Image (spheres, coloured by chain):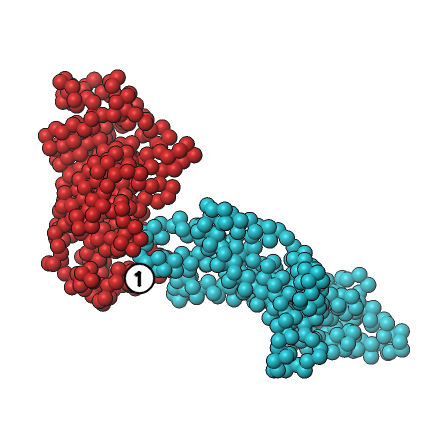
């Protein structure tokens, strides 16, 4: 899977109009480099040589990636790996936090909406889920920014932390971090929450109709036990939704970080596109893809932890 | 807690006398777009203590609704609109609510679910669900409960320890059914309701399960209600038989009398529809027409008249009286007049 993406990135960069690698090579030659110098200089940046046939370039590119060597930024000359790692923490933590918050909230409200499904409140909750699901995340981000940073400026408009504070484990800094994270995390939470409500509601409604719930009731099981039966069975399909949500939120991060000027992967990607910083661009794309894939794998693994049908089947193989 | 001590001692020697059930004037309605329609209308039925009563009827005749009423567990949009269900030692369950009702369910009335194959939580082992059941009913000695469950499963031909350690998907349909029966009996309920206990099973397993039901019934002195659409099942296990049609009990009495000499035209039709071992398959006559559903059920007069060979004018307007005839009850106009009780003569007329 990751390999497919790698290849895809490589192909895109190779066929990009203007051939950035070639362009750089030629630019260096014009600046008076010898062809050998220009070639090695370009290779240092891109991890593949500007000349030679495409197969050789490909093998070399993959080879250096296998050594976790992503080349250097064409703009700042810093290792792409370092740039990405630095940016990743600003994306991964808020995105995970937002999705998990949203998951908890969505599951809770979804259960409630399912139990009260024939009442007005249940309808309203379901409706809110459908509406939120229909609104693009950047609209939610812009709306939140407009309300809480402009109309009623209680939260910071942009940035990840106040630069007045010394980075490190001091209260001011951590407080400032949290303060700046509120809006982006809230945006992630709200944009994913609609999906969770709808999925959880339909899942709970299905489980409520299952025979074993009525059977448990007829056996006089305690309400709390029946509730646990419902919750555990209903939450299973939600893990798939969770993985998909993480993927959606990750790609949404590109817009959201732009809105809040948050120095994460999305912001990095946008900036690198603006600067034609191909190496960083490729690296950021790659990292976002890998994150999404890992989220899916983790969700699948959760399944086997909670569902004995999958667990035992695995043991017997 | 007497329940806990009973369960803890496990054995069957100290089971108190069985509980009789008296259902009086029971009406259960379901809410539909066309208003509230009765699925069960004004039923009177007695389950004498220590007997097995078979309840037969076609799909949609209200059997399961009646059975759920015994636990005051009619599911929305249905509700019990009128009547009483009196169980010895409990009282009228229709009035029970909340915790008291919960304790009665499972603790005093065991219920084997229609489709008992699906009556288990797929994410928990049978044993863990057994412990959940024990905790729900404040059983102090869970170890004794487990031992009792193992013993019951053993009697039903299963390896108790292995079954308790299994998930639902690791058990076959027949095994799950027996687990369902175990759950209904393990708390020493005196009244056991079996809603189509053998419907999804093959003939061999069915026979096996019926035998177990019969045995345990006799041994524990239970009062048992077996709901089925299979008259063969009733003939095999029941002492008494009640026939339901369109939400009403049309005939009830001792099983041999009713099956040997059915009076109500519906009962006769049902029995004629069974293929015999001897004679051609053509001798089995299907009952013409279809059973009514909630929407087509007549609101007055006899519910069976549309398909009845003995139909009279009075059937259109007047509810049939319940006639006592030689130890049984029959709800039919044709049984009241002086020219009645000549079933053989009428039978000829229907052909």
Kindly identify which chain the residue marked by label 1 belongs to: B
Q: Residue at x 70, y 71 (%)?
A: A159
The residue at the point 68 percent across, 82 percent down is A166
Horizontally, residue A144 falls left or right of residue B230, namely: right
Q: Secondary structure at mark 1?
A: helix
Q: Which residue is mark 1?
A: B132
Q: Residue at x 35, y 60 (%)?
A: A225
The quadrant in which residue B203 appears is top left
Q: Quadrant of residue B20?
A: top left
Seen in the picture, residue B35 relative to A160 is either above or below; the reply is: above
Left or right: B234 as drawn, with respect to B59: left
Towards the viewer: A119 or B281: A119
Tell which chain the image draws in cyan.
A
Does any portion of residue A31 appear in the rendered image? yes
At x 47%, y 65%, the residue is: A302
The quarter holding residue B291 reads top left
Is B323 left, or right, of A3 in this rendering? left
Q: Colour of chain B?
A: red
């Amino acid at each position: 899977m990751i390999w497919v993406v790698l290849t895809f990135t490589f192909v895109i960069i190779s066929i990009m109009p203007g051939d950035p690698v070639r362009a750089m090579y030629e630019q260096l030659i014009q600046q008076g480099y010898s062809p050998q110098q220009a070639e090695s200089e370009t290779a240092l940046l891109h991890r593949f040589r500007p000349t030679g046939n495409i197969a050789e370039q490909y093998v070399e590119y993959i080879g250096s990636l296998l050594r976790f060597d992503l080349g250097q930024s064409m703009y700042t000359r810093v290792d792409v790996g370092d740039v990405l790692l630095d940016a990743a923490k600003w994306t991964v933590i808020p995105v995970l936090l937002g999705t998990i918050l949203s998951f908890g909230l969505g599951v809770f409200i979804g259960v409630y909406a399912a139990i009260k499904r024939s009442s007005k409140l249940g309808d309203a909750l379901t409706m809110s889920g459908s509406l939120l699901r229909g609104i693009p995340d950047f609209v939610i981000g812009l709306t939140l920014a407009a309300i809480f940073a402009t109309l009623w400026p209680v939260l910071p408009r942009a940035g990840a932390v106040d630069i007045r504070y010394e980075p490190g484990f001091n209260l001011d800094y951590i407080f400032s971090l949290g303060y700046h994270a509120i809006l982006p995390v809230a945006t992630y939470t709200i944009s994913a929450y609609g999906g969770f409500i709808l999925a959880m509601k339909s899942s709970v409604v299905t489980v409520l109709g299952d025979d074993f719930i009525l059977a448990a009731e007829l056996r006089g099981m305690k309400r709390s036990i029946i509730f646990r039966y419902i919750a555990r069975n209903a939450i299973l399909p939600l893990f798939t939704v969770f993985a998909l949500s993480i993927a959606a939120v990750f790609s949404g991060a590109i817009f959201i970080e732009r809105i809040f000027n948050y120095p994460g992967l999305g912001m990095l990607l946008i900036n690198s596109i603006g600067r034609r910083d191909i190496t960083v661009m490729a690296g950021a794309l790659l990292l976002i893809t890998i994150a999404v894939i890992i989220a899916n794998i983790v969700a699948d693994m959760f399944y086997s932890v909670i569902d004995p049908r999958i667990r035992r089947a695995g043991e017997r193989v | 807690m007497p329940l806990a001590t009973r369960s803890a001692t496990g054995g069957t020697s100290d089971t108190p006398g069985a509980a009789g059930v008296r259902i009086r004037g029971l009406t259960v309605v379901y809410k539909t777009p066309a208003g509230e329609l009765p699925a069960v209308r004004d039923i009177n039925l007695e389950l004498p203590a220590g007997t097995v009563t078979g309840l037969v009827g076609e799909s949609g005749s209200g059997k399961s609704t009646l059975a759920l009423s015994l636990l005051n567990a009619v599911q929305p949009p249905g509700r019990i609109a009128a009547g009483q269900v009196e169980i010895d030692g409990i009282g009228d369950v229709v009035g029970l609510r909340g915790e008291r009702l919960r304790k009665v369910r499972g603790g005093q009335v065991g219920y084997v679910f229609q489709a008992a194959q699906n009556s288990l939580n797929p994410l928990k082992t049978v044993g863990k669900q057994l412990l959940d059941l024990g905790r729900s009913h404040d059983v102090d000695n869970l170890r004794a409960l487990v031992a009792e469950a193992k013993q019951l499963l053993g009697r039903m031909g299963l390896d108790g320890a292995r079954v308790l350690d299994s998930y639902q998907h690791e058990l076959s349909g027949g095994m799950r059914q027996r687990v369902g029966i175990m759950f209904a009996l393990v708390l020493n309920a005196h009244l056991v309701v079996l809603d189509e206990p053998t419907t999804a099973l093959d003939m061999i397993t069915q026979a096996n399960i019926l035998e177990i039901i019969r045995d345990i019934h006799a041994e524990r002195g239970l009062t048992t209600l077996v709901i089925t659409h299979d008259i063969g099942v009733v003939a095999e296990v029941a002492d008494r038989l009640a026939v339901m049609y369109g939400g009403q009990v049309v005939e009830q009495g001792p099983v041999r009398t009713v099956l040997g000499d059915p009076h109500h035209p519906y009962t006769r039709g049902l029995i004629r529809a069974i293929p015999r071992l001897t004679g051609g398959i053509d001798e089995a006559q299907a009952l013409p027409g279809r059973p009514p559903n909630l929407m087509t059920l007549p609101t007055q007069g006899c519910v069976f008249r549309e398909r009845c060979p003995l139909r009279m004018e009075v059937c259109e307007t007047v509810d049939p009286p319940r006639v006592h005839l030689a130890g049984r009850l029959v709800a039919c106009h044709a049984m009241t007049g002086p020219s009645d009780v000549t079933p053989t003569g009428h039978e000829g007329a229907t052909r």
